[in-house]
Image (cartoon, rainbow, N blue to C red):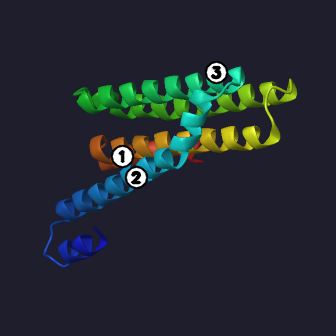
Amino acid sequence: MINFYGDIQKQSLTEEESLKLSRSISATGNALYAAKDIKDIEIDLSNFRKSGNGTLNTLYSQFNEVSHMMINRAEQFLLSTEESLFLEDLGKLMLDNQKNYDKMLEMVYDHSNRKHLEEEEIATVLNVNRELYSSCKSIILVLKDQKLNPEQAVQFESLPPFR
């Protein structure tokens, strides 16, 4: 991909074509990051689902619910044609991703305080939460590159989760 990008950049491109190419490369990179994050936690999620520990089962269900909700909202966003709402909707999606991350942290700390999780389980759950957050954020960045115009993209990156 990098070689392909470099070869295209050597071509005579208009400013608009160059911008579209850069945004496409950025979106592709973020999609790869999202996939890698999920791949990295796939075994942990499977272990949570199969665990005899009810707390891990509950956390798995929460992770599953969050990921399905984010995927559904991202799909709706991609299918939307209401350009006037793109920035607002994507900002809400980013804020909800942060809220979901924080909510899961609270759940983990609550269960750890009540001794429902061992130290190693806590570390694994915290890692899964961080990777899921990162994957969702990468997907949101793909949506930014694909749906927002350059001015909206700049506004989006000045929203609180980016500061």
Residue located 86% across and 23% down the image: 114
- Is disc 3 surrounded by few (<14), some (14 to 19) or many (20+) residues within 10 Å? some
Q: Quadrant of the N terminus?
A: bottom left
Instruction: Say what amino acid the circle numbered 1 marks.
Output: Val
Tell me if residue 155 can be seen.
Answer: no
Along the viewing direction, whichever of 7 and 118 lies nearer the viewer:
118
**Residue at the outermost left position:** 12
* Type of the residue with mark 3: Thr
Q: CA–CA distance between discs 3 and 1?
A: 30 Å
**17 relative to 141, above or below:** below
C-alpha separation, residue under disc 3 versus residue under disc 2: 29 Å
Q: Tell which circle, 3 or 1, labels the residue nearer the N-terminal end.
A: 3
- Residue 47 location (% of width, % of height): 59, 35
Quarter of the image where one finds residue 46: top right
| Mark 3, residue position | 58
Residue at mark 2: 30
Q: Which of marks 3 and 2 is in front?
A: 3
Of helix, strand and loop, which one carries label 2?
helix
Closest to the camera, between mark 3 and mark 1, is 3
- Residue bearing mark 1: 142
- Residue 28, disc: none
- Residue 91 location (% of width, % of height): 46, 33
Task: Give x and y (percent) for residue 95.
Answer: 54, 32
Label 1: which secondary element: helix
Can residue 101 be seen in this snapshot?
yes
Residue 18: x and y in percent read 22, 65
Helix, strand or loop status at disc 3: helix
